[in-house]
Image: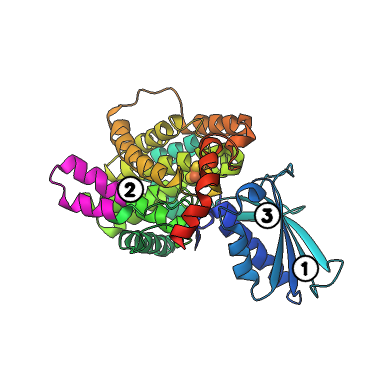
Amino acid sequence: MYSLRELYRIGMGPSSSHTIGPSTIARMFREEYPDMKFFKVFLFGSLGATGKGHFTDKAIETVLAPHKVEFVWQPEVVLTRHTNAMRIEGFKHESDKKPMCSKLYYSIGGGAVIEDGKDDTIQHVYPDNRMRDIQRFCNENNISLPEYVEKYEGVEIWDFCKEIWDTMNACIDRGLNATQKYLPAALLLERKAPRVFKTAMEESNPIVKNDALASAFALAVSEENASMGVMVTAPTCGSAGVLPGVLRYAQEVYNLPEETILKGLAVAGIIGLLAKHNASLSGAEVGCQGEIGVSTSMAAAAMCYFLGGTTDQIERAAEIAMEHSLGLTCDPIGGFVMIPCIERNANATLRAIHTASYAKVLAGSYRISYDEILHTMYETGLDMNAGYKETSIDGLAKYYDKLLDEDMKRREQLLY
Ligand code: SF4
């Protein structure tokens, strides 16, 4: 399995596969061909279908600036290796008929990219690829999951986790203190995090207060994500609010020290890495199961660790969270990472917190393992109709788009 450094990436929202991945590809291409002055970018499959709503073009233009970029949107072209495919052609002059260079890449989820025809060369740092092997190792050697992470990643992993946690926290704070009333894009969606946070601070019922706090933290990150803010993939941008929501909640409500929060980040990382290795983190490949499903498992595992859960109970929490995320589709309306994404992050945050306590009281009675549920999630995702996998064709996107067409111009006028 890869390092946590391949899971948690700091980058610009709103989508790890549609903004972080494509901007990484553009950077790679530009570094390889520094003399090119004009670029033609072909966006295939899901990148072509929802790239506009996900601001893929803006992310690529930012990297290739000041040079001009022409985009060719081809959602109907679905390549076999991965639906998020992107070709870049480089030209010496805009007037040239033929490109000087051309390369095909794939944005395979969570910000990871791969060039066509090349193998994955990223080093694996963990010898285990299954949760059952990790559990066995930890139980036989009487070590915790954070100790397992430190054993293979080295003690310097805690500096990395600190950087990740600081970035998550900064993102929460920006979202809570945002002064813009609306998110960018024509949906004219209100930023809710500041209002929910204020309500939480004034609430006297402790149950409502704590749930509102956790929701506000998750909303803050997701709204920053939708505004192209800087964030951490956890495991993706679209699902980036859940884990920070749970971590900040645990820190504030349970008064946990930072050292414990960093260990929770490591626990969640193992759960996310297993999903990356054995299934997929790509909404375009397996629907929202691979994004919010995995983030809920990661966050439930971290929360279970905070509650004093054993390695086996942590595995339980991750499994339960994924078992009840099976079949979760990706159908963002208008291609924007807003509806259902933002609220789904808040909802998943609450689910992760409650799943953690539930896993703690189950006392060892279970049938399905996290390894098995990941296998099931992947198969379910592959079986899912393409209209439910980040193409904005079916589901919520299908019906709401009618309304969107009618309202688009009026909303744009109001907003800009
Ligand atoms: S619906 Fe889920 S998978 Fe799709 S863009 Fe939103 S958060 Fe990502």
Residue flagged by tag 3: what amino acid is it?
A: Ile
Q: Position of residue 28 (x, y in %)?
A: 67, 66
Left or right, residue 95 beside residue 107: right
Q: In the image, what residue occupies the spot 55% across and 29% down?
A: 376
Q: Is residue 141 visible?
A: no
Task: Give the residue at x 74% y 67%.
Answer: 39
In this figure, which residue is indicated by the disc labeled 3? 114
Residue behind mark 1: 90
Q: Amino acid at mark 1?
A: Gly
The total number of labels drawn is 3
Q: Mainly helix, strand or loop, the magenta region?
A: helix
* 317 or 71: nearer the viewer: 71
**How many other residues sit within 10 Å of disc 3, few (<14), some (14-19) or many (≥20)?**
some
**Kind of residue sitting beneath label 2:** Val
Single out the residue that lies furthest toward the right. Answer: 97
Q: Residue 80 or 126: which is nearer the viewer? A: 80
Q: Is residue 320 above or below residue 252?
A: above
Identify the residue position indicated by label 2 in the image.
246
Which range is magenta? 195-216
Nearest to N terminus: mark 3 or mark 1: 1
Q: Is residue 217 above or below residue 174?
A: above
Q: Does 11 lie within the magenta span?
A: no
Left or right: where 90 falls relative to 19: right
* Separation (CA) of disc 1 from disc 2: 44 Å
Say which residue appears at 54% left-offset and 55% top-offset. Answer: 6
Counting from the top left corner in percent of width and height, residue 352 is at: 35, 39
Instruction: Report helix, strand or loop for mark 3.
Output: strand
The residue carrying pointer 1 sits among few (fewer than 14), some (14 to 19) or many (20 or more) residues within 10 Å by Cα, namely many
